[in-house]
Each structure stands twice: as structure tokens, then as C-alpha cells.
Amino acid sequence: MKTNNIKKSLICFGLLALVGCTDNFDEVNSNPDGFTYEETTQDFNHINGPFKTMFDNVMVNVPGWKYQIANDLSANNWGGYTAAPGFDGANNLSYALSDNWNLWCWEAAYAQVMSNFYKVERESKGKYEEFYALAKIIKVQTLHKMADAWGPIVYSKFGTTDATIAYDSQEEAYGFMFADLDYAVAELTKRIDAGEKSSFTNIDRSSYEGDYKKWVIYANSLRLRLAMHIVKIKPALAKSEAEKAMTQKFGVMTKADDTFILIKNVSQHPLKVASYEYNDSRMSADMESIMGGYNDPRMSSYFKTSVKYPGQYKGIRTGGIMGDKTIHQDFSNFGKIIEKDKQVVWLNTAEIYFLRAEGALRGWNMGGDAATLYKAGITASFEQLSAGGVADYIADNVKIAKDYVDPAAPFNSGVAVNKVTVAWDETASNEVKLQKIITQKWIANFPDGYEAWTDHRRTGYPKLLPVLNNQSAGVITTEFGVRRIPFVSTEKDGNPGGVATGIAKLGGPDNGGTRTWWDVNVPNF
């Protein structure tokens, strides 16, 4: 990691400053470079730039060093996907949470996505409602991750000129997100029903290529994801929202091409910077234990065999004791998913089948039984990665996660903890069935660390090897791991009153051990 990058000055970073930066929006956009307003609005060029920035920062696609700090050195590790061959000190990986790292995820969401959402809103609301609908979907995709990571966030008050920009509780934020999806789905469906030609062609930077119907399906699928997040705190609302997603006329993702892939202006997968340029990210021990135990055919899509141990997939213990970086640097790097395919995926069809399987397990109307939907999810993941052998994989009732062995530093080794087979067993308990569903969802969603971390917190699955190097001074337990990210220093400096409202709605101290609203320590069933 290039540490000098994190010291760069931020322009319009704090929420109060962000609002100030948009005060002269009309003036700036009425005559840029001497063009008339009519000329700048031709083919919607006046909102193309803001949309591009939004698309690029939902997953912090560019620059790669920011993705590393905002995603890989936090949720990707906490969700069990990646590990670093170095970073033994006090930082996120050892549960001594680093504000200098975590503030960049906040910055990407607010200084990049939301500041540009505000521009699109001012130019499209009441005039080009289809663009407002698209912007709302991207807003929800961005801010649900923020709410899941921080708890209370700024949602309804963003863009106001209040002296203090108040936070919404996580529960309130989820209510606003469901409402925003309601609006977007209704608006785009109305235009589809009217036979309207899409206006998104030059705006959409994804594999959807401006298709209104695909964006409605995406919004419905995102609703299903959010519904499952709240299943333990608001089960009735979760069921209602999940079934709403299913019964909307266009439904949820079912086909391979429903998977959302960012394709325009993606020169390389952002994870490649941390892994190949900086040598700071590698396959995790959990991935080796679980996928290696299953002899999973998708392994070669995700990872390369180790340079140090030819022919073997070797992961690194998350939160282990690394010593010199070179000791583990030649463990398994990432494979064609970032080298060749460059697929920056926001949401995939496989995940939606697994969400439906979990819903069916809970007795919801998900258009099928849990076993059928579970198998469909695995099949969809294999298809996405062009992997063979899916029938044998689904039927395997023998293989389980294997013990992890660190040949370079044996004290990092550990006994396998996520011991479930792949094959569906109708006689198993709901708890075992859920563990199977979430384990396969975890594999299929790589490398979406924020969703993996969310599932691990809300269900306890997949079971992950505990960290060995907990430097949180007792704030974060080794048993339960990081539950949330503390509010960032830029907000504490620029919007202290707002942060105070967030802490008041948090229900506990502002640290990484406090659970968020939906993260309740109760049984899954």
C-alpha cells in the first residue's frame, strides 16, 4: 500500500462541506467552457459525468489504492475472503481499527457517490424522473453498505444546509431505502409499460446497457438482499419486503445475464492493485479451508496456486502473526476473476437464489422450495465462472472444510471450523441447512467482502478461523469479531453535532464491538 496516498488532502470531504460545494451548482452547470445550458443537456451530457463518478465509487473501483483501504483492509478480511502477508501492527486486521483506513469508505460514499447523486437529483427530479430513479437505486446500493458497516448514517438529511446534519438510525435508513426502491421500481415500470425507449444508453456503465427492465429486476433483487439483512430484528417486515420483491411483475434475478457487471472504463479489477502491485493481499486461510476441503472447481477462477508451494492453493490466516512480509508473499494470489475477466460485480444471480433459499427455509413465498433454490444458486455460480462439474459438486455429501496448515509459520495453523458438506440433506436441522446456504452464498459472492461480513455477523456463517492477533484491548472479542466501524474523524471534525445524533441512536459506545440495529445476538430460528 502506498501510504502517502492516504495523506492526500480531501476537497469537500465532510458532509457540511459537501453541501457547500454544491451551492453554486446551477451556475457551474449553466455555462461550462462557454457552452449554453441547452448544449450541455444534449443527450443528457450534464448528468453523464456525475453518473460516471457514482458508478466508479459504489465499490470504490478507482483508484485501486483506495479500494484496498476502503474494502480489502476491512470487510474483505473480516468477511473471510482475503488476508495480508504483512500488517502485523495495530490496524484493522488485528482489530485495532484504523480511522486513517476506514474514513476512505465513508469518503467514497459521500464525497463521491452522494455528492454526485445530489447533482443528479437537482437536475432530474421533476424533469427526468427516469434518471432520478436510476440514481436512487445506486444510492441504495451504496448506502446500505454504509448502514451495515456503521449503523446510524446520514441518509434523509443529506443535501440540507442545516448547521448540523443529523444522522438517521439504521432502522430509519432501511425504511428510507425501501421507499427509494419503491419509487424507482414504480417509475421505471411505468415507462416500460408505456413502451418508452430507454434514455440510459449513454449513462449506464454496466452490462445492462440501459435496459429499464434489468434495472427493475436489480432493484427488486436488492430489496430481497435488504429484507434478509433485517430478518432477525424485524421478521414480519423482512418477509413482506422479500415477497414484494418476488411478486413485482418483473421479479428478481434468475438468468446469468441478470448479474450486474460494471464494464465501462474498467481497465483492471481494483483488487489487482493491492495484490499484484503492492503484494498486500492474498487468498485467506478460510477460503483454503472451505473451498480446498470441497475441492471446489471454482477455486481456479478465484485464485492461483502458490509460487512458494507449487501446485497448492495456500491461504493466509486472517489476523494471524505474519512477521516479515516476504514469508507469506508467495502464497496464492488471485486468478482470472481479476486478471482476465475484470468483473466488478455489484450483485449476482447466484446470491439471489441463495437469498430465496433462505427465505423458503423460513417459510416465505419464494417461488420454490429451499433445496431446489439452493441447488440453483450453486449452478448459477458455476455458470457465472464457467466452471465444470456442478452435478457432482452438488451431490457430494462427504467432503467438508479441511484443517488449515501454514507451512511457513506453523503457529498460524488451525482446525477447520465450518464443517458442513455441500449436498442438501432434507433431514438436517434448519440451522445446518442455513449454514450450507450461507457457505455457498459466501463462495459465490467473492470478493464482495461487505456482504460476506454482513452475513457472518447476522448468521454466524460461514464459521471463520478466529484471529490470533487481537489488539483491540478487549473492545472487540475474538469470538464475535468486528461488529461495526466507528464514526470517522472527518465527520467528528466537520459535523460533530451530527455524529452526536448518530451515537445517540447507536445504542452503545462508538467502537467496533457495538452491534448495529439488525445485528442481534439471538438464534437464527
Image (spheres, rainbow, N blue to C red):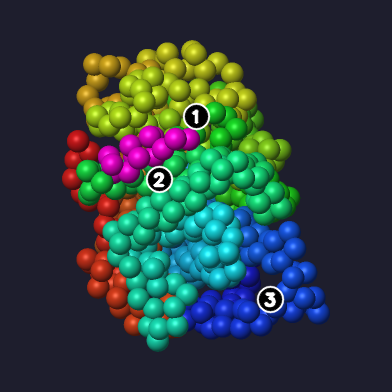
Give the vertical position of 115 relative to 83 (above or below).
Answer: below
**Residue bounds of the magenta highlight:** 238-250
| Numbered tag placed on residue 349 in the rendering | none
Q: How crowded is mark 1: few (under 14 residues within 10 Å), some or many (20 or more)?
A: some
Q: Are marks 2 and 1 in contact (CB under 8 Å)?
A: no
Labels 2 and 3: the sequence-earlier one: 3
Q: Position of residue 211 (x, y in %)?
A: 62, 42
- Rounded to the nearest whole Å, what is the CA distance between mark 2 and mark 1? 15 Å
Mark 2 element type: helix
The Cα atoms of the two marked residues, 1 and 3, are separated by: 41 Å
Residue at the spot 66% in from the left edge and 59% down from the top edge: 52
Q: 226 or 311: which is nearer to us?
A: 226
Tag 3: amino acid: Asn
Disc number at residue 29?
A: 3
Q: Which mark is residue 254?
A: 1
Measuring 32% from the left and 52% from the top, which residue is drawn there?
481
SS for callout 3: helix
Rendered location of residue 89, percent (x, y): 46, 63
Residue topped by disc 2: 223
Q: Amino acid type of disc 1? A: Thr
Q: What is the spatial separation of the Cα atoms under label 2 and label 3, in whole angstroms?
A: 34 Å
Quarter that holds the N terminus: bottom right
Count how many numbered circles sit on residues in the image. Answer: 3
